[in-house]
Structure formats: structure tokens, C-alpha cells
Image (tube, rainbow, N blue to C red):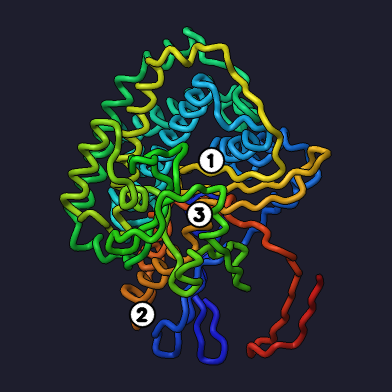
């Protein structure tokens, strides 16, 4: 804790059990009343600049180096954009289904990783439990069967990725206009061998998340919660579709804000704002403006925007969720239950695809009219992922703009931090470790991937300010 001129500054750094690096700063007055609370993203990634000058066919492989947790999402979003560049957006059935299988493998492993490895220590032991046991080692000691289940579920998702992308991390399966391999009978049968166990564990995972939410609803409903808009892709008939669709956004009550929007024109609907205290941008819906146009993405938002889920067990789970929490849910901690419903949906989709003979097809790539600009979108584990590129006549990328899932949730995560700080820290005589962990619990509900989420917008000048011990500015340097 730092104290300067009557202001106490409490720093939580690093924020733990999330992907990437961030910190939270809380400013208190002399009576421990909260003056300000912010989530800062303290690392910078420059991939919009790195890819400029590179040939477009390299981009689906290059950009997935943004992250070791969700590389498949970046790989496929970039590939979808490059499909349009080569005029190959109408993929062959084999190509589209192989990509979908890869994507649902990614969703499955990522959701299992987050719920069991990162979030469950808080949910099973309590937000203020002893930090010595409130971790994945504590889960292994107290719930060994659950720990094994978590490892095997993530391993299964990685095996799906291996057989569709060629590698478990940073694969090369998707190429402009298609894919570079199909799924052999041997590979299919290897994945089918463990499928029934994965389905059973997925059902059990939904029940765990549901029971935790409902058993503690009085505590969890207000925790870090606030009204917000929600946005995601949906299929044209309104079904949840995590790979492709049209943009839909609803307000806090479920009223439609935008619907049936072709994402090639996303700039007509979405804009971005930059603030000096974070490397992460602040997207908003243009028609509402930056003050109130922010929105949530990810599992909670997707259950709010989708009309239904087209796999039977996940749809039944969704209906139970809606009956308990309402058609439009603004409860931040409900992200976990929604995430497990998507886990079940993902394994149902994997089952359906593994029994589809199109995966053994040999027509892998299509091409058509060459274009110079394209947008690729999909629903990544953490929410809507935008990839926008321009390519010159020499096949070089000359512009790239990425709006990553966690970036879309930037303002909501800050709101969640402010809500928890106001409810649990404001005015207390002593700030405990459990109170600080509560701030992190609210951030973890979004499953943020902070290493993905920091990106350039326009010119990126370097500004350095130096303060003396009394908080007075003594020097200021600025570099274009």
C-alpha cells in the first residue's frame, strides 16, 4: 500500500489465475472510502504492426502467437478473413466441418481449463479461504477425482485440435480458402474412444456450476453484477453458433439493439476508444456512444443473445438456466454456469461432427475473385473476436485491426472491479487478503486473456511522467 497526500493506493499485482498480466489499483481517502478503482493491462502486444508487410497467407499462422491459450481462435478468425481475400469464403463441406471440429475442441479445452483450474478454487473453497489451499494444488488434495477429470477433459480438447490443426498449440490446419488436411478414419476412431466419458463429465460439470450458483444465489447474484448490453454472433435463425453467423446485441432487458448484421460492415456499428491508463481499448456500440454503448461478450452474453441452442442436452440446460435466472441475465457470476452449458454444447457438436462422413472428404480448398479487404469473426471462448485486414496488390498486409474478446469486456471488467470494491472494501478499517481476492474473483468470471487483449490503435506515442514523494509532477517526456 502506498500513501501520498491523504490518498492510499492499494495495488493488486499481478492479478492471478488469469491468462496474461494485469493489475488493479484502488485509491482510498483518509477514511478508507474508495475514490477510484481500475483494472490496468500492463503489457503491450503489437501484432497489428508485426503482420504489416507480411504475405497474407502467413497471417493465420502468425497471429495465433498472440496467445498460448486460445491460438485456435486467432488462427480461425484470421483464416476466415483470408478466405474472403482469396474469394474462397464458401468453403467445401469438409473444410468448414474440419474447422468447426477444431473450434469446438478449442472451446471444450479452454472452458474446462478455466472452470476447474482457475475458477473452482474460489467456488469450492470460498473467496476468503486460506490462499495456501485456494489453488489448483488444493483442488488436487481435496477433490482428486475432479482434478483428474479436469486434466483429462482439457487433454481431450487438445487431442481434437492436434488431429485437425496438426499441433496442439499453434497448428496450421486452416489456410486461405480451406484446410490442409481431412480427418482420417484412424484419427476419428481415436477421438470416438473417449467421447462417451467426455459427455458424462460435461453433464456433471453443468450440474456443479448450476448447484454452486443456485445454492449461493443470495451471495452471488449481486457480486460484481450490474446491468449491461450483450453482444455475440448468432446463426441467422437465432441459434447459438460459435463459428459463424450475424451480429446481434441486446440491452439489459433483452431488447434488440442490433440484429442480423453482416460483420463485414462492423465499423458501421462498433467503434473503439483509448484511455491513457490502459493498453486495452474500450469498444462501444456507435449508435449509443462511448458513455453507455459498452457491452459484454462471452458465455453470459451468448446465452442472452441466442434464441436457442441446437444441441438437445445443452438446450435443456439453457432452459433450466433461463428458468432460474431469467431470459436476460446480468449476474456476473452466472458466467460460470453459462460457460459449462457451452462446454456441454461443444462436446455435443464434437460428437455430431465425428459421425459426419464429410470429414473424410478430399475437396479441401476453394478460390475465387481476389479481394483487398476482409473481416473474420467468430465466437472465441471468451467472446466475440474481430480480425480486420487490408492487403495490397503485392499480397502484403498493409492494415490490421483486432478487437479481441477480452477487449470487448474491458469496461465490464472495470465495472465489476468497482462494484466489488464499493460493496466489500469501501470504508472498512482493514483490508484483508480475502477482500482483495474478491476483486480478482470478479475479474476471473470473465475468463480474461490479457495477453491477447492489448493492441495498437492509431499512433502509439511513449509518454513518461516522473513524480516526487509528495505526488508532484517533476518531469515529463513525450516521444511520437
Q: Position of residue 420 (x, y in %)?
A: 35, 69
Q: Is residue 17 visible?
A: no
Q: Considering only order in the chain, which callout, 2 or 3, is on the residue closer to the N terminus?
A: 3
Q: Considering only order in the chain, which callout, 3 or 1, is on the residue closer to the N terminus?
A: 1
Query: Could you tell me how far apart the alpha carbons at marks 3 and 2 are, in whole angstroms?
Result: 27 Å
Which residue is under mark 1? 70
Which residue is under mark 3? 406
Which residue is under mark 2? 426
Task: Write the residue at 77% across / 48% down.
Answer: 398
Label 2, residues with CA under 10 Å away: few <14, some 14-19, many ≥20: some
Check the image and report above or below for 315 versus 12.
above
User: Within the image, what quadrant is residue 434 found in?
Assistant: bottom left
Task: Write the residue at 72% across / 81% down.
Answer: 466
Q: Considering only order in the chain, which callout, 1 or 2, is on the residue closer to the N terminus?
A: 1
Residue placed most toward the observer, 350 or 55: 55
Label 1, residues with CA under 10 Å away: few <14, some 14-19, many ≥20: many
Q: Secondary structure at mark 2?
A: loop
Amino acid at each position: 500500500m502506498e500513501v501520498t497526500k491523504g490518498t492510499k493506493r492499494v495495488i493488486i499485482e499481478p492479478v492471478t489465475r488469469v491468462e496474461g498480466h494485469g493489475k488493479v489499483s484502488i485509491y482510498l481517502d483518509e477514511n478508507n472510502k474508495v475514490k477510484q478503482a481500475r483494472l490496468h493491462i500492463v503489457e503491450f502486444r503489437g501484432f497489428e504492426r508485426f503482420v504489416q508487410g507480411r504475405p497474407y497467407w502467413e497471417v493465420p499462422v502468425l497471429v495465433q502467437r498472440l496467445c498460448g491459450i486460445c491460438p485456435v481462435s486467432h488462427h480461425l478468425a484470421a483464416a476466415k478473413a483470408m478466405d474472403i481475400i482469396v474469394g474462397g469464403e464458401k468453403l467445401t463441406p469438409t473444410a468448414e466441418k474440419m474447422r468447426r471440429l477444431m473450434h469446438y475442441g478449442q472451446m471444450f479445452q479452454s472452458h474446462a481449463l478455466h472452470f476447474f483450474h482457475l475458477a473452482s478454487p474460489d467456488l469450492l473453497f470460498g473467496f476468503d479461504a486460506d490462499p495456501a489451499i485456494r489453488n489448483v494444488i488444493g483442488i488436487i488434495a481435496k477433490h482428486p477425482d475432479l482434478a483428474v477429470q479436469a486434466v483429462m477433459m482439457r487433454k481431450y480438447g487438445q487431442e481434437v485440435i492436434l488431429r485437425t490443426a496438426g499441433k496442439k498449440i499453434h497448428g496450421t490446419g486452416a489456410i486461405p480458402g480451406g484446410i490442409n488436411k481431412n480427418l482420417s478414419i484412424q484419427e476419428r476412431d481415436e477421438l470416438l474412444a473417449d467421447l462417451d466419458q467426455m459427455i458424462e463429465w460435461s453433464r456433471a460439470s453443468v450440474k456443479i456450476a448450476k448447484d454452486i450458483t443456485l445454492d449461493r444465489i443470495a451471495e452471488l447474484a449481486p457480486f460484481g453484477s450490474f446491468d449491461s448490453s450483450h453482444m455475440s454472433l448468432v446463426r441467422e435463425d437465432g441459434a447459438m453458433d460459435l463459428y459463424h453467423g450475424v451480429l446481434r446485441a441486446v440491452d439489459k432487458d433483452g431488447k434488440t439493439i442490433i440484429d442480423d448484421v453482416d460483420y463485414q460492415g462492423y465499423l458501421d456499428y462498433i467503434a473503439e476508444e483509448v484511455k491513457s491508463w490502459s493498453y486495452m481499448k474500450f469498444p462501444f456500440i456507435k449508435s449509443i456512444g462511448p458513455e453507455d454503448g459498452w457491452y459484454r461478450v462471452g458465455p453470459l452474453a451468448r446465452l442472452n443473445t441466442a434464441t436457442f441452442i441446437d444441441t438437445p442436452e445443452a438446450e435443456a440446460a439453457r432452459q433450466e438456466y433461463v428458468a432460474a435466472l431469467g431470459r436476460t441475465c446480468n449476474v456476473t457470476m452466472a458466467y460460470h454456469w453459462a460457460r459449462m452449458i457451452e462446454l456441454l454444447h461443444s462436446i455435443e457438436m464434437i460428437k455430431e461432427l465425428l459421425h459426419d462422413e464429410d470429414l473424410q472428404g478430399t475437396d479441401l480448398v476453394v478460390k475465387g475473385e481476389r479481394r483487398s479487404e476482409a473481416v473474420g469473426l467468430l465466437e472465441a471462448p471468451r467472446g466475440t473476436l474481430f480480425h480486420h485486414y487490408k492487403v495490397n496488390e503485392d499480397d502484403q498486409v498493409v492494415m490490421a485491426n483486432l478487437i479481441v474478446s477480452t477487449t470487448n469486456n474491458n469496461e465490464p471488467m472495470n465495472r465489476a472491479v468497482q462494484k466489488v470494491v464499493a460493496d466489500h472494501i469501501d470504508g472498512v478499517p482493514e483490508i484483508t487478503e480475502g477482500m482483495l481476492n474478491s476483486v480478482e474473483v470478479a475479474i476471473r468470471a470473465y475468463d480474461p486473456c490479457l495477453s491477447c487483449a492489448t493492441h495498437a490503435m492509431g499512433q502509439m506515442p511513449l509518454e513518461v511522467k516522473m513524480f516526487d514523494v509528495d505526488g508532484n509532477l517533476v518531469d515529463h517526456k513525450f516521444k511520437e
